[in-house]
Image (cartoon, rainbow, N blue to C red):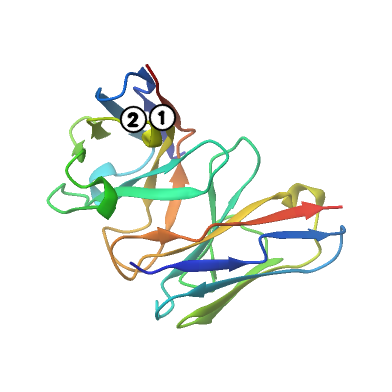
Amino acid sequence: EIVLTQSPATLSLSPGERATLSCRASQSVSDYLAWYQQKPGQAPRLLIYDASNRAAGIPARFSGSGSGTDFTLNINGLEPEDLAVYYCQQRINWPITFGQGTRLVIK
Amino acid sequence: EVQLLESGGGLVQPGGSLRLSCAASGFTFSSYAMTWVRQAPGKGLEWVSIISGSGDTTHYADSLKGRFTISRDNSKNRLYLQVNSLRAEDAAVYYCAKDTGDIVATGGFDCWGQGTLVTVSS
């Protein structure tokens, strides 16, 4: 099973700042990595797929990068509505696995 | 508009069974893989199972094999999850989600239901 390790566990930033979230895989997942946003009380929402492709309707201030074992989700110009837990997910191997999540707190 | 609506959750005793259902609309159901993901209270996301568009191919989380069975009825645009021999650790919100493809490595789960809560308690 591929283990995804996300860091930091919690990130606290102010509106307008840039958030950088990391996801590291225990073995290469090529670029088959997705990022999801889960706001409090809501279902997850797909942000990024295949490491760097924004899903439909996702603002350009969300961007993904990386390949192999190291991936990054960047959120530019933080807004209060970005308060959420962000998860990475791999699907190159079965079983599909998720990272443990990074909680983004907006000061 | 793509919509997914789960049902079938509830309170069940340890060792009991449930059949979760997900009604899909707004897309060609049989063209896409569908998946179940669960989330225990206050915890992260845990992938449960996936089924191909035709229903011929399924995969499960290793820890759940043998107790959980995924299926679909493309004539009714419905996805199912049969959960047996329930344990306290199975208590969670169960989400169904649509894949962007049909069991390929690329893509992600681009539409999610609101979830159905399964509680396991005597």
Q: Is residue B85 left or right of residue B43?
A: left
Disc 1 element: strand
Residue contact at pointers 2 and 1, CB within 8 angstroms: yes
Q: Chain of mark 1?
A: B
Q: List the residue tagged with mark 1.
A: B5
Mark before the other along the chain sequence, 2 or 1: 1
Q: Position of residue B73 (x, y in %)?
A: 18, 34
Please give the label number shown on residue B23.
Answer: 2
Callout 1 amino acid? Leu
* Residue plotted at (41% across, 35% down): B4
The residue positioned farthest toward the left in the image shown: B56
Please give the label number shown on residue B83.
Answer: none
Q: Is B44 above or below relative to B81?
A: below
Q: Position of residue B95 (x, y in %)?
A: 42, 38
Crowd class of label 2 (few under 14; some 14 to 19; many from 20; radius 10 Å) = some
Q: Is residue B120 left or right of residue A76?
A: left
Crowd class of label 1 (few under 14; some 14 to 19; many from 20; radius 10 Å) = some
Callout 2 amino acid? Ala
Q: Chain of mark 2?
A: B
